[in-house]
């Protein structure tokens, strides 16, 4: 939002924006957060922005992984897809391996979906698992070459619907009068 500001994150305090995403798992919250930051992304990959970007050279990829910034998370995806191991990415980025294992889990979910070939083929539980991991209908549609509304219609036919849960904003210390849903 501030093109003249340096996007490199350092120890200096900056206002680079924020996202709040609530989910039952890190993966779901992570995907929701990426959707919420107004960059045209639908989550961690499986969108047009990813398709429009040519793969970086190995040198550019390694350099991008070392510099904390807003695009580094997508470079981590590229690195994992290119065959970098979680341990390699952890060493290069200094990101705790737990988070990288969670991101690798998202790629594993995509691979599992793709093995079915068509949207009609995966069992309900496979599609439900992808939704629990935060995959938007748009992303699932990209995996199968279908528009988002076809994925939504298939999901509703399978009775896989969104749910809204109450979030206790007071952590049960006392009665919450302003909970999130």
Image: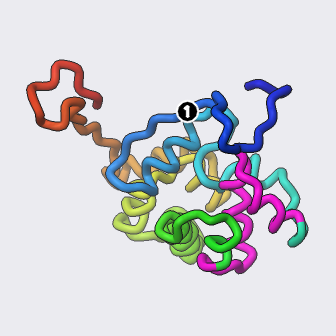
Residue 95 shown left or right of residue 130 in the figure:
right
Query: Is residue 109 visible from the viewing direction of this image?
Result: no
Say which residue label 1 marks: 18
Q: Which residues are magenta?
A: 60-87
* Image position, residue 106 (x, y; %): 52, 65
Where is 92 relative to 138, above or below?
below
Where is 6 relative to 84, above or below?
above
Compare residues 172 and 25 and report the one nearer the observer.
Answer: 172
Q: How is the image coloured?
A: rainbow
Residue at the (38%, 41%) spot, across then down: 22
Residue 65 shown left or right of residue 53 in the figure:
left
Q: As drawn, which residue projects farthest toward the front?
A: 11
**Total number of numbered discs in the rendering:** 1
Where's the N terminus, which quadrant? Answer: top right
Does 111 lie within the magenta span? no
Does 63 lie within the magenta span? yes
* Image position, residue 148 (x, y; %): 58, 44
* Image position, residue 34 (x, y; %): 58, 43
């Amino acid at each position: 939002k501030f093109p003249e500001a340096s996007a490199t994150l350092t120890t200096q305090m900056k206002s680079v924006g924020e996202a709040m995403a609530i989910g039952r798992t890190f993966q779901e919250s992570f995907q929701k957060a990426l959707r919420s930051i107004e960059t045209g992304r639908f989550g961690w990959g499986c969108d047009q922005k990813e398709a429009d970007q040519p793969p970086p050279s190995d040198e550019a990829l390694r350099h991008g992984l070392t510099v904390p910034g807003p695009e580094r998370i997508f470079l981590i995806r590229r690195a994992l897809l290119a065959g970098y191991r979680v341990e390699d990415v952890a060493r290069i980025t200094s990101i705790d391996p737990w988070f990288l294992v969670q991101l690798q889990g998202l790629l594993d979910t995509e691979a599992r979906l793709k093995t079915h070939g068509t949207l009609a083929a995966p069992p309900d539980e496979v599609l439900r698992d992808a939704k629990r991991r935060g995959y938007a209908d748009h992303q699932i549609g990209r995996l199968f070459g279908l528009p988002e509304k076809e994925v939504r219609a298939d999901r509703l036919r399978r009775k896989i619907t969104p749910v809204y849960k109450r979030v206790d904003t007071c952590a049960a210390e006392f009665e919450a009068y302003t909970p999130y849903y």
